[in-house]
Amino acid sequence: MSEVENQEYYLEQLHDQVSFLIDACHSYDRGNFKQAKIISSLIRTIVKDPASNGRKSRTTSLLTHIGKKPSIKMYNTGFEAKNARINFNLVGIATVPTSKKFFKKRFNHIYLPLLDESQIVDVKWLSFEEWWNSNIFVYDSRDLTNIFTRKRIVLTMAEQDGGSHVDSHEDIDKEYLDLATAAKIYITNVDCEGNESPFVNMHYALVRQIGHELLISLMQEFKFPLSYKPTNKINLRGVPKHKIKQPGILVAGKKIESTRTANPIKGVEKVSFKNPFYKPPLQQ
């Protein structure tokens, strides 16, 4: 095949993968949260290249085949804070009615992708490597440090948790499993009687948001004539979208700053949350 024919072939393949990704995202938006596993597999196909360790591999991303990976601009909906202790802002939390009226449980506490509604974005467009490897989830306390990049959560879901392959349970990334099982160390709801209920599906919501960012980036770059209409309306079950609450950012210090810019495109809190891990310097 000629170089032109090769490019046409890979562009057609990318068009197909983008179409599949849109379908999976729309299915997620209709309540099929486990479609995030399909989303993770499709993201992997589009962006994953072999590690730079000199080994030969047949795993080459479509973006690399097309020659766009070094130059493509990636849509960013996050804020990477300096000295973060708690920072996960691609997703929000919401309490919504259950889908089945005969359940004793009346409400579900869930994570949802923020789509284009985040109030704490720093830079709108990033290089691929900065986007793929930036921290989208940070939980750093005295007893636990857990940090996820887009790359880590997408490839763990795809390669270990059913997107493209299922590993033995004991071999799956333990910190990923904490997200998947809604560990109470993160965010819980406490009702008027003091009963705790964890917010669930953070890993799914994070991957759905990453899929959203990738789709916006690819549609911008390649101008595919495809319809993509992201929404949280169905999953909110009648709850207004302004009821989706963003978790706050906690930093080791008194001021929230971005690792990327001194001039975020959207405002963040002027004063950080009181940080239980921060110890001010001794007065002289």
Image (cartoon, rainbow, N blue to C red):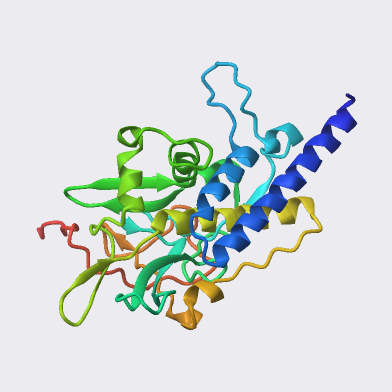
Q: Judge whether residue 83 can be spotted in this image.
A: no
Q: Position of residue 157 (x, y in %)?
A: 46, 43
Nearer the observer, 210 or 109: 109
Nearer the observer, 241 or 284: 241
Which residue appears farthest toward the front when viewing the image? 102
Nearer the observer, 206 or 261: 206
Quadrant of the image for the C terminus? bottom left
Which of the 4 quarters of the picture holds residue 198? Answer: bottom left
Q: Is residue 134 left or right of residue 7?
A: left
Q: Position of residue 187 (x, y in %)?
A: 28, 64
> Is the residue 50 above or below the residue 30 in the image?
above
Which of the 4 quarters of the picture holds residue 27? Answer: bottom right
Quadrant of the image for the N terminus? top right
Identify the residue at horizontal 42%, vertical 75% (top origin).
100
Identify the residue at horizontal 30%, vertical 68% (top origin).
272
Q: Position of residue 51 (x, y in %)?
A: 53, 26
Which of the 4 quarters of the picture holds residue 76? Answer: bottom right
Q: Position of residue 134 (x, y in %)?
A: 47, 47
Figure disc tally: 0
> Is the residue 275 above or below the residue 41 in the image?
below
Which residue appears farthest toward the top when viewing the image? 55
